[in-house]
Amino acid sequence: MKFQIQREDLLNPLQKIIGAVEKRQTMPALSNILVKAEKEQISLTATDLEIELVTTINMVVDEPGETTLPARKLLDISKALPNESKIDIQVEGDKATIKSGRSRFSLATLPAADFPALESIHGIAEFKLPQNILKELIDKTAFAMALQDVRYYLNGLMLEVNSGMLRAVATDGHRLAYCEKQAECEINEMKQVIVPRKGIQELLRLLEDNDAELMMVIGSNHIQVEIAGFKFTSKLIDGRFPDYNRVIPEDSKNVLTADREQLRQALVRASILSNEKYRGIRLMLETNLLELQAQNPDQEEADVELEIDYKGDSLEIGFNVNYMLDVLNVTDSSMVQASMRDSNSSCLMTYPDHQDCKYVIMPMRL
């Protein structure tokens, strides 16, 4: 195998797929990337057996062939070379020689036959949509995914596909994020899948904020997204996602409306003296006034007041301040609304100019 490539043409795709490389090295080949050189293109594949990322680069190849190269070493070499330099890669036997200018590197390879492949995906539903729709859905909800929860089905993002609609829902049991977007996905019946946390993080790295089309294929055990020279495949979490409709409360008469940035800054100020472990903060609501109180085990206290639009009952309720800040940080909306039925009920946060997203936060005892 032999070819020459521009540094940037190799570096940029490598940076996009490196996240799929197995760090724990359960198999030696998983710390490598599979390089396949054909007459007019090369493909690079990385996998950890849960997700797989493939990128294709169109170029003329001197000698076709395939092998696996140490992923992080290849990335580090590409990073260290000067901008716009040319890289010559040649493989003979179990050694790869990489030359650029007056630099020369010799890397150990492993046979391409040792590289594991994810099983082929059989599509149950497939459709095209602009990539910024999927990116926004993930951006607005992924923060609420659980992290290493024993309820494994919470350690991912639920995607729900229905005719003309794509929804994303994430929850860790203490809060829930819901967002939906209209999309031209014509399917026979509604389909729900749970994409694991790592898969969502790697997919987000591929998506850009433009309306270029991507192809999404949903299978019984896998999801696949093809976009601009990249193919992303992830296993799905086998489990039943909670019924999110039962968690989202109906609108209440106790609705506060506030400037999003002013509320965010007030919460940040009050949180400085909250308990570092539990991050609890007390919200006290009166007509057109919100008082935020926090205290910590050192008996230190913070008290912050904010003028808001509120005509409901007098309320006193506790929340994890980080959960509220997460919701306020995922949008650029100017105003935010929060509704609560009483002092023991969950809070529903929405944005008047983004009705397609809803956030639920469970109360805390303080």
Image (spheres, rainbow, N blue to C red):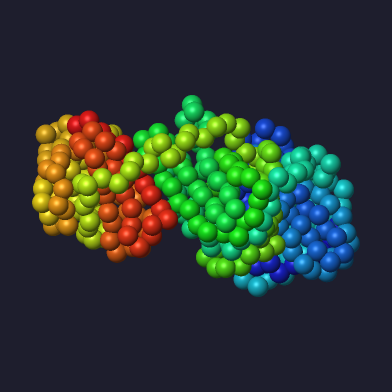
Q: Nearer the viewer, residue 143 or 124?
A: 124
Instruction: Decide: is 117 above or below 62.
Output: above
Taking the image as drawn, is residue 145 in sight? yes
**Quarter of the image where the N terminus is located:** bottom right
Q: Position of residue 146 (x, y in %)?
A: 45, 37
- Write the residue at 31% across / 49% down: 349
Q: Nearer the viewer, residue 85 or 37?
A: 37
Q: Residue furthest bottom?
A: 84
Q: Nearer the viewer, residue 305 or 125?
A: 125
- Write the residue at 22% across / 57% down: 258
Q: Position of residue 11 (x, y in %)?
A: 65, 62
Tell whether 147 sits left or right of 214: left
- Write the residue at 38% across / 57% down: 355
Q: Position of residue 137 (x, y in %)?
A: 49, 54
Tell whether 15 sits left or right of 121: left
Instruction: Decide: is 88 above or below 301.
Output: below
Taking the image as drawn, is residue 75 in sight? no
